[in-house]
Structure formats: C-alpha cells, structure tokens
Image (cartoon, rainbow, N blue to C red):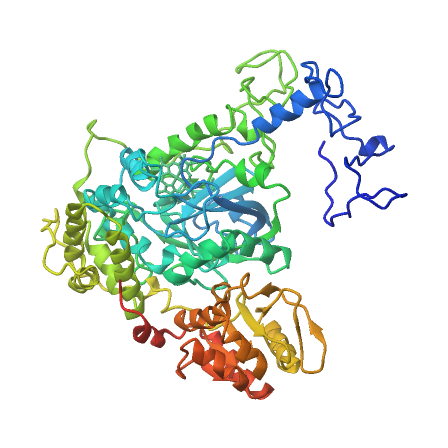
Amino acid sequence: MSAPSNTTPAPAPKCPFTGQIPAETHQTTDDLKQTLTTNHGVPISDNQNSLKAGLRGPALLEDFVLREKITHFDHERIPERIVHARGSGAHGYFQVYESLSDITKAAFLQNPKVKTEVFVRFSTVAGGAGSGDLPRDVRGFAVKFYTSEGNYDLVGNNIPVFFIQDAMKFPDLVHSVKMEPDRGFPQAASAHDNFWDFVSLSPETMHMLMWTMSDRAIPRSLRMIEGFGVHTFRLVNAEGVSHFVKFHWRPKLGTASVLWDEAVKINGADPDFHRRDLWDAIQNGDFPEWELGLQVFDEETAAGLDFDVLDATKLIPEEIIPLRMVGKLVLNRNVDNFFAETEQVAFLPSNIVPGIEFSNDPLLQGRLFSYQDTQLSRLGGPNFHQIPVNAPRCPMRNFQRDGLRQMEVPKGRVNYEPNSFDGGAPRENPTRGFVSVPEVMDGTKIRKRSETFADHYSQARLFFRSMTPTEQTHIVSAFAFELAKVENKPIRLRMLGHLANIDADLHAGVTDALGMPDESESIEPAVAPRDLEPSPSLSIIHKAPVTLQGRKIGVLVTDGFDSTLLMSLQQRAKKEKAAVAVIAPKIGGAVDSEGTLFEADFPISGGPSIFFDAVVILASKEGANDLATQSAAVNWVSDAFAHLKVIGHTPEAQPLLDQAGVTPTDGILPLPSETALSKYITTAKKGRIWERESALRRPG
Ligand code: HDE
C-alpha cells in the first residue's frame, strides 16, 4: 500500500521548547494506519538511520529494512523505450456520435451513449526519457481503448506517413537518428551525419522528411496536434463486409506550431513545456479534445488510386476521400502516478477487437510482432497485461499461466483446454470470438518490394506545393539548418540531389541558404515524379482557426501599471477561453498606479515571451525606462516581435519597444485605454502576424 499523498507541504517540525529545527527530523505517528512499513508490511520504527554495530560502527547485513529500501531504489528505473521514450499520458474517454454499424461491428463503435475509457500517451521519438519536449521530431499519439470486447490500441503519430515502407528497415532508421554510437551525441536531434546519410540513401524517406522539416514537427502544444493511424486498416461489419480505413484525429483547438527559434529557446527555458501544458490544462478542467475522422474506401477505390494503399509513405488527400467525423476523444484525468501509468503502459498495434483488422502493409506487419516483444524486456516478462494501466476492463480468462511477475493466483486443477474436469472453464466462441476476414492469399514466397511502392517523390512534391509560402520557407530553413550540421559534404550533396527531384524552388531555396548553389549530386528517380493536385488541407496555416481558446497571453507589468487594463484583459480572455499570465520584473509582483500589489506568475527571466501566444506590455513610464536598460526585458519584447506575436502596449511602454527594435507594423497595437482591447483580442485571435516574417528572417 502506498503512503497517503500530501499536496500542501507541511512546515519543517520544530522543537516545541527551543523553536529550532532539530539535527535529525523524525515525523512519527501512533496510528497503525499511518505507519510506514516495509514492502512486506513490517512496521518501521526509524526511517532515518541504518542498523549499525555501535553509533559509529559499520552497518549490519541483517538490516532488512535498509536493504529492501535500497534494493527497491536501485531498480526504480526500467529500460526506457528504445523509441518514443519521452512521453506524457492521460486518461479520458471516447464516444461515437452515431452507430457505425454500417461499417464495423466493433462493440465500442455502436452506441453513442457509451463512453469507452481510454489512456493516451503522446511522445517524441528520438530522444531519451529525460530529453526536452521540443526537438524537431515526430510525435507519437497512442490511444488504448478499454472496450467491452478487449483492448484496442491505435498506436499512431502526428504525421500521416512514415519514413520507411518495410519493417526490415526500422532498426537502421532508428539507429541512424539516435545518438551516434561512438560519441553519444546528439541527443534528440536528427541534425547529424548518420541520419542524413541513411535517409539520403533511402529515397522512400523523402515524403516523410518534408513533414518532419515542416512546422508539424515542432507543435505548440500536445493539445494542438493531429493524429493518424498511418497504415491502412480494415473495418468489418456484422455481415462480414470489409472496407479499408485510414484513421485521423483532429484537435478541437486546431493544429498549431511554434517557430524553430522558439522551439530552441523553449527547450532551454522549460524542457517540460508540452508535458506541463497538458497537465495544467487537464488540472484546470480545460479538457483536451479530438474528433475521430475516418477515410473509408473499398478495394475498387483503392485499386484506382495512383499509389499503393499498403505503402505507409503515402497519404490519401482529403480532397480525394473526405473525412467522416465519427466521434470524440476527451482527456479528463491526469495520471495518479507517472511511472505506474505513463511509463508502464504497453501499446500493441496487435491489440485489435472484432470489427477492426490489419492490412498487409509490410511496415504494420512488422509492428505486430515488435511491440509484444519489446514489452517482454521493458516490463520484465509475459504478464505485463496485468499491470493496471494495461489490464482490460472487460473480463479476461484463458489458460496462460505462470511466468515472471505473475500477479494473479489462478485457482483449480485445470490449466489446459480442452478439458473434461471443469464444465465452467473458458471455451472458444465461434460467433462472438475474433474471426479474420477471409482474404485470399496466393503468392510466391519472396523477399522483395512491390513495384507499386516505387514512386518516392510525387507525394513529397505534393506536400511542398500544398503549403503556404510561409510554411515553404520554414521547410527550406529546416533543411538548411539540418544539412548545415552534416559534416560530410557528400551526404549534403546527395540530399540536395533528392530535393532537386522534389521541387526546383525547394532545391534552390536550400542550396541558396547553404551557400552551395551548383553542387548537388544528380539522383536518378526509380519512377519520375508527377505533379499531383495540391491538397490545401495539409497546410496548418491554411486551416488555422480564428481563436484564442487554449492559448496563453503573457502580460508584462511594472510598478505603476494600470490594473484596470489588466483586469479588463483578463475578463475578455476568459470569455475567449484563453489564459492570462502576469509577468513582472520580480516574482513578488508589481504595485499598480493605485498602490495595490498584484502577484506575478513569473519573473521576466522565468517567463520569457516564448511561453505565450500573444503578449501585452502594461508598463508605466518609469517602469518602461527601467526595463529598457535590462537585457532580459528587452529580449522578452524583441523575441515576441521576432516570433511574430501580436503585441499590445501602453503608450508609456514605447522606450522599451524602441530598445527592442519593435517597428510599428501590423499586430503592434497601442492600448491607450480599455476600448482598444477589443481590437487587440480580435487581432490576437488570428494568431501570428506571418507578414512580418520576411522582413525579419531569411531562410537558413
Ligand atoms: Fe513504433 N515502436 N515501431 N511506430 N511506436 C514503439 O514499442 C516499431 C512505427 C509508435 O507511447 C516501441 O512499446 C517498429 C510507426 C508509437 O508507448 C517498439 C516499427 C508508428 C510508439 C516500436 C515502428 C509508430 C511506438 C518502443 C516499424 C506510427 C510509442 C516501445 C515496423 C504509426 C507508444 C514500445 C507508447 C513505440 C517498434 C514504426 C508509432 C520498439 C518495429 C509507423 C506512438 O516496439
């Protein structure tokens, strides 16, 4: 049994006579229910001292209390996930809008009144468990549905395609992106030789690279990422009719990203930026929500597409097969214990339920084996399904027995089937049990890739050409940044050759940003790329919602500030479901023009403007003049400007703005009085001022 948790820290115990904190602190109790015990329940009398031979003598081997405590501590860490090691999880539920019985018999997709419990874990891929939240990386989006017919795991990413087409290449892909084996760096970064060497030798990675070099790989919040099942799956209805399906998660708050310069700075200022944001939102009752969208299509439609639906490096544009929105996912409960739940959760793409099936995607087929296998070493044996976060919520019975970490005590003589001893023992169920779609299989045993997988450039080109000019510039910059970190020039030149095959402007942009105009290697594509119809739905900026919901406004105040403006802003932000944080020169707060102290949420150094979506500077004349001499305050403002944020400011703040190089352009809004706040809110709802960027930053 674990000790009761205390959320408010108690003051250190003091001696009642002297008032001093004693040299050794013993917090004792007479209540057996509150008594500390060993793992085996033996009450502990002293939790501060080991058993010794004399006060100053050596420790005794018989001190079972010490040995148990230390042994447990020594094994507190389990092997971290080889990929997706850094993650954040939460509980919630999923609910369909209407019965999906036309396409699937899955029990949890039948009744709109049923809320199916879920556990969701978001993750980065390349970094270790202690790495920062904002590397340029794919995000994992794994959902475990505890359905009435067993656990269904939809283990997806925030990008709809993947680097490779066949599971055989996965260990090489992961080895190449992880820290280089001789030197042990870089951590959580694809910007190094090994990664670009591997991908430039694997043209199938080109489409995915366009996504990872785009803003999708640096999300603003886990609450603002899309999710995708990536592979093609099957849905099967009660009549046995099967359809192909692609799964999509759409965040209610819209999809949003940070800028690369922000990502770099956030990683330093708050490496837990995403984890904290998710935790805080749930804690505050702002439950993150996603809609589940399906692209459902039959074999004939699949055959008519100009790529193979079994190829995970391809997507089906929504403009070709629109999404059917079928239900919602709500995360409404933080974990009670990070290790027990987020760390020990075991997702298995092989966890499916009647009504949902796999396809022959060779990447998916490899995953069906890998995840089960991984859990054996990560969670110490075959009984990891008994860990509470992994256990099905519906009854589970079979004759699998024993093994490491067996937590259950199965009763009775019979541990096999068929048996004639126990009429009540579990038996197979031909009608309700899982039956696979009787797909005809007839092929030669072969180790080869299908030619229908050979076009590696057309969809990469489609993606680039579907972006707004701003997003294209960011992609160019990301390639330039990453390739500039590649020390071996031939790797850079090889990669530039691929970019030339994708798009001439992309190639020109990157070569120009690198200062390497005419040196690319020429790469002969296996299949010549085609010009496909652009898909605007792939652009984040194109479909950005006009909203402040879930966003955060940072308000910088100084002594003598006008608190009516602050309070009015707080009210308006609340109406928009946005949060406001107060930043003052010191954490103690600032005194307004009436002499009232307002506590701060952050001091300037601890609350840089990179944490916020829009900012306001409520400085008095003296306050602004003073802050104009302080680099932290000047950076706060110049960063907000360079990161294209809407900046509201009192006229008195002008000296600080001048010092920060803020020029009076779009999105710089003076706030002489409360009435100007409406315009501020309307402008901030539109998000960043993208038009500002070209004057401030060149690609590279
Ligand atoms: Fe994974 N992947 N993966 N993966 N993956 C793991 O499983 C693997 C792939 C994804 O929050 C591991 O339990 C292989 C695609 C997520 O716990 C491991 C292949 C997609 C998570 C593994 C892939 C994913 C993982 C590591 C190629 C998107 C984190 C620990 C055949 C559709 C789940 C673990 C969590 C985790 C293997 C490719 C998503 C090693 C062999 C494609 C979200 O088993």
Observer-nearest of 256 and 627: 627
| Quadrant including the N terminus | top right
Image check: 72 left or right of 490?
right
Observer-nearest of 608 and 36: 608
Establish if 342 lies above or below 596: above
Image check: 428 left or right of 66?
left
Residue depicted at x 82% and y 32%: 33
Residue 438 visible to an observer of this rendering: no
Task: Indicate the position of residue 392 as horizontal and vertical percent values.
Answer: 57, 35
Observer-nearest of 304 and 466: 466
Image check: 677 left or right of 64?
left
Establish if 71 lies above or below 87: above
Residue depicted at x 43% and y 58%: 265
Query: Residue 126's image quarter?
Result: top left
Image check: 636 left or right of 218?
right
| Quadrant including the C terminus | bottom left
Task: Indicate the position of residue 633 as horizontal and vertical percent values.
Answer: 50, 70
Establish if 440 lies above or below 124: above
Residue depicted at x 20% and y 30%: 447
Task: Indicate the position of residue 165 as horizontal and vertical percent values.
Answer: 26, 41
Residue 627 visible to an observer of this rendering: yes
Q: Quadrant of ligand 1?
A: top left
Establish if 441 lies above or below 514: above
Query: Residue 34's image quarter?
Result: top right
